[in-house]
Image (tube, grey):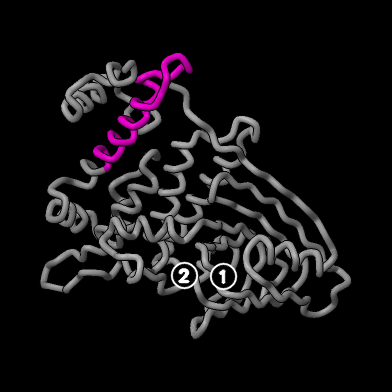
Amino acid sequence: MSLTSVPIARAAMQSDDLGEVQDLMSQRYVEHRTRVVGGADAFVFRSASAGAGPLTVDQLTYQACMAIEAQPFESLLVVSVLDGRFDLTAGRQQSHAGRGESLLYLPHVGLDLLMDRMTYQVLQLPLRVVTRIAGRAGVAEPDFRFEAMTAVTPEANRQWLATIAYLTRLLSGPAESGIPALLLDAAIDATATAALSVFPNTTMTAGYTPGPGQVAPAAIRRAVAFIDAHVAEPITLDQIAAAAGLSTRALQAGFRRHYDTTPTGYLQKVRLEHAHRDLQTADPADGATVAGIARRWGFPDHSRFSAAYRTTYGQTPSHTLRS
């Protein structure tokens, strides 16, 4: 069988016409009111957008100080600053970000922004994708909400920047060949999972009653979200613990209590599940191999991968690939 692909759509523009820019931003996101603070003579706007399916990553530059009023967003939007800085007010919350920092635009809340000669990336994803992933953590859609705009820790902010870097690479491939649908679906789920592990939301607090010596389920969910978002990368136990906000000892105790396994055991289980799905859908006629799929999901040792796969699925990976 051959894998279907989703085309990559790209667009770019440069303009010094404020009205044209306001129209573009209103069409791409929500209704905007934009004005230049100070002299408008030097105003220049640049935009480069790439998207596949419901996922888009835009890079925008305002070469001026801008004041923007935006209507409430109904999707997930996260801004990552490459240069410059901005201040953001969303309802009663205020925040700011500079180079290397990210902010989440709170859904369903009008925004006021003040940008100072800023270049930034914007991730946009339907909110329903995030609520679906939140449902896996036991939070029903009516009960789900993001509660703050900034990452829970500096390490979490770096996790988000790594996610955006991965998406940028994914969307930079040849437009004519597109992105394999399975890979895009996995990337979308990983992005939603990363958002849930990086920015404060109700999945982090649901169902937890503190007790002496307990590891909060929210902390373990952050660890699981980090693993799910970086499952194909060479992540370490220390990185998982940092993302969860726990010591490695507490992390291991939490996984034993809630998943009856170790963090690395859970990581191997998730990697094995991804490899199994790839083996089921890949076609040897297209050059797919067991070794290649195993390496893709973090199994450099072919014999160990085959043994673990057979123990879990009751057959060899080569049999799955050929069937």
At 72% from the left and 68% from the top, the residue drawn is 117
Is 268 within the magenta? Answer: yes
- Horizontal side, residue 80 vs residue 295: left or right: right
At 68% from the left and 75% from the top, the residue drawn is 68
Q: Residues within 10 Å of mark 2 (few under 14, many from 20)?
A: many
Residue 166: percent from the left, percent from the top? 51, 45
Residues at marks 2 and 1, CA–CA distance in whole angstroms: 9 Å
- Horizontal side, residue 258 vs residue 161: left or right: left
Instruction: Return the mark for residue 127.
Output: none
Q: Vertically, is 146 above or below 294?
A: below
Residue 11: percent from the left, percent from the top? 71, 48
Q: Vertically, is 322 above or below 113?
A: above
Which of marks 1 and 2 precedes in the sequence?
Answer: 1
Q: In the rendered image, which residue does mark 2 sit on?
A: 150
At 16% from the left and 73% from the top, the residue drawn is 210
Q: In the rendered image, which residue does mark 1 sit on?
A: 97
At 43% from the left and 63% from the top, the residue drawn is 154
Q: What element carries label 1?
A: strand
Give the amino acid at mark 2. Answer: Thr
- Horizontal side, residue 190 vs residue 261: left or right: right
In the displayed orientation, state which residue is furthest to the right. 41
Residue 187: percent from the left, percent from the top? 45, 44
Q: Quadrant of the N terminus?
A: top left
Magenta segment, principal secondary structure?
helix
Question: Residue 280 sits in which quadrant?
Answer: top left
Instruction: Please tell me how many numbered marks the rendered image carries.
Output: 2
Whether residue 294 can be seen here: no
Q: Is mark 2 on a helix, strand or loop?
A: loop
Residue 118: percent from the left, percent from the top? 69, 65
Segment tinted magenta in the rendering: 267-294
Q: Vertically, is 7 above or below 286?
A: below
**Which of these two is toward me, 228 or 136?**
136
